[in-house]
Image (cartoon, rainbow, N blue to C red):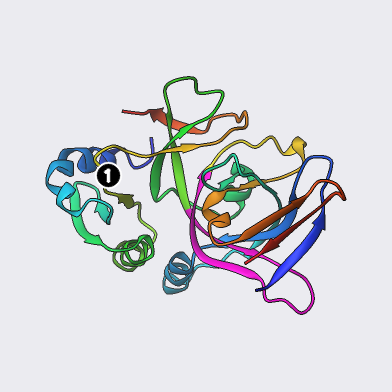
């Protein structure tokens, strides 16, 4: 699964990240790099630091928002949601 | 306010758009001396039932993208339990026609979803894009307009 390690890092650090709820965190492997005010800023820093290596940009949320799609789609899911 | 008007197609509110790599990824590709893929022309369905924009894997694969995010997605197929989908950073341009500037998003996250291109489109244009637009649906005359 893509970004599995980064997701684990996000979950492990979520309690302390929640002081910045709503902002965007940049994670590379098991390292939390920083928190940014916008998705664009976090993404830009991710590409600047890690070039084309995998990294995760995720909005910090105590309860993860669900995206809704009213059509039947063949899922390209990576794992069951937790 | 720029706008365009199109006929309602048999499969819905279909528009032409271009999807490419995000601005930040483009800069990273240039820095790595790798080729920047040309934006890909797609057909998108404006879908007010989609909270976010979704793109078929065939398009994302052509752009050589790797995921930079994950989101939980609920569809009629997922039942009560949402599933985690990969998210990709892209750019999106919708051309309005002569005399109007295009609608441009230099960075927009999209979700990868099999959209079954036999339905006649490659992307669902969701409410994340529509949040900056005025959509008018004229069912009587079979037209729709998008202003932005």
Main secondary structure of the magenta stretch: strand
Classify residue B17 by image quadrant. bottom right
Percent position (x, y) of residue B78? 50, 23
Residue position for label 1: A61
Which residue is nearer to you in this view: B42 or B63? B42
> Looking at the picture, does residue B17 appear above or below residue B48?
below
Percent position (x, y) of residue A79? 39, 28
> Could you tell me which chain the residue with mark 1 belongs to?
A
Residue drawn where x is 21% and y is 38% of the image: A11
Please, which residue is most extreme toward the right here?
A: B141
Q: Indicate the secondary structure of the residue bearing disc 1.
A: loop
> Looking at the picture, does residue B147 appear above or below residue B11?
below
Please, which residue is most extreme toward the front here?
A: B140
Which residue is nearer to you in this view: A68 or B33? A68
Classify residue A24 by image quadrant. bottom left
Magenta range: B89-111
Residue B106 part of the magenta-drawn span: yes
Residue drawn where x is 59% and y is 29% of the image: A74
Please, which residue is most extreme toward the bottom here?
A: B99
> Looking at the picture, does residue A64 appear above or below residue A24?
above
Percent position (x, y) of residue A73? 60, 31
10 Å neighbourhood of mark 1: few (<14), some, or many (≥20)?
A: some
Percent position (x, y) of residue A28? 25, 52
Residue drawn where x is 43% and y is 28% of the image: B82
Classify residue B145 by image quadrant. bottom right
Residue drawn where x is 39% and y is 51% of the image: B68
Viewport quadrant of the N terminus of chain B: bottom right
């Amino acid at each position: 699964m893509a970004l599995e390690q980064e997701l684990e890092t996000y979950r492990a650090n979520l309690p302390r990240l929640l002081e910045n709820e709503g902002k965007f965190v940049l994670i590379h492997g098991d390292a939390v790099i920083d928190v940014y005010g916008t998705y664009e800023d976090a993404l830009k820093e991710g590409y600047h630091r890690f070039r084309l290596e995998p990294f995760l940009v995720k909005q910090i949320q105590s309860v993860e928002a669900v995206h809704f799609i009213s059509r039947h789609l063949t899922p390209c899911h990576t794992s069951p949601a937790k | 306010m720029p706008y365009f008007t199109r006929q309602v197609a048999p499969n819905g509110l279909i528009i032409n758009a271009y999807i490419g790599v995000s601005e930040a990824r483009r800069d990273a590709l240039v820095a790595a001396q790798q080729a920047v893929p040309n934006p890909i022309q797609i057909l998108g369905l404006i879908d007010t039932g989609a909270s976010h924009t979704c793109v078929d894997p065939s398009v994302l694969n052509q752009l050589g993208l790797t995921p930079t995010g994950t989101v939980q997605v609920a569809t009629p197929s997922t039942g009560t339990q949402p599933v985690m989908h990969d998210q990709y950073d892209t750019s999106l341009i919708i051309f309005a026609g002569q005399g109007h500037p295009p609608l441009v998003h230099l960075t927009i996250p999209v979700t990868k979803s099999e959209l079954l291109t036999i339905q006649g489109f490659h992307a669902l244009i969701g409410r994340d894009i529509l949040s900056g637009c005025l959509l008018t649906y004229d069912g009587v005359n079979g037209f729709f307009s998008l202003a932005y």
